[in-house]
Image (cartoon, helix red, strand yellow):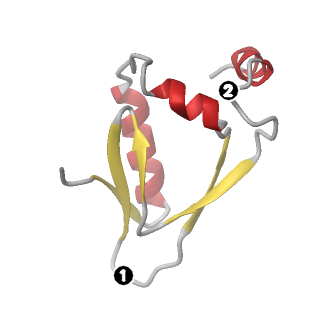
Amino acid sequence: LSYDILIDMTENGLLHPDYNCWHYYGPYGFTHQGLRWGLVPKGDPKAPEIKMKGAKFTTCGVELLKIVDIEPLPAFTTKMIKHFSQSGYDMVKAKS
């Protein structure tokens, strides 16, 4: 998202004002493009969790995600998979 959009979303209470938020990911999953994904360490199952930075939704923003149409962005997903692969993790879809 562009900085202007991030500002608009923050001013409307959808994002936390700290755009440098972070969260540890590892054995836990995350949602991307409406699907659940997980990060699986390559080789070493006891690899440390990965620290990811980015904008974080507020509680209100998370609730609104449930009613917003998600636009497919396969090129972005491919870039995420490549980034995690270079960081020592496989990004895999969670089993339903």
Q: Amino acid at mark 1?
A: Pro
- At 41% from the left and 43% from the top, the residue drawn is 31
Q: Is residue 88 left or right of residue 3?
A: left
Image: 74 above or below 52 = above
Q: Position of residue 62 (x, y in %)?
A: 55, 34
Q: Residue at x 66, y 40 (%)?
A: 56
Compared with 79, 47 (above or below) is: below
Of marks 1 and 2, which one's residue comes earlier in the chain?
2
**Dot 1 crowding, Cα within 10 Å, few <14, some 14–19, many 20+:** few
User: How far is mark 1 from mark 2, CA to CA?
Assistant: 36 Å
Q: Quadrant of residue 66?
A: top left
Q: Is residue 35 above or below residue 23?
A: above
Residue located 43% across and 39% down the image: 79
Q: Nearer the viewer, mark 1 or mark 2?
A: 2
Which residue bears the numbered disc 2?
A: 14
Q: From the image, tell me which residue sits under label 1.
A: 45
Q: Position of residue 12 (x, y in %)?
A: 74, 18
Identity of the residue drawn at 62% across and 37% down:
59
> Left of 47 or right of it: where is 18?
right
Q: Position of residue 10 (x, y in %)?
A: 76, 25
Viewer-proximal residue among 62 and 25:
62
- Above or below residue 36? Residue 26 is below
66 or 55: nearer the viewer: 66
The amino acid at mark 2 is: Leu
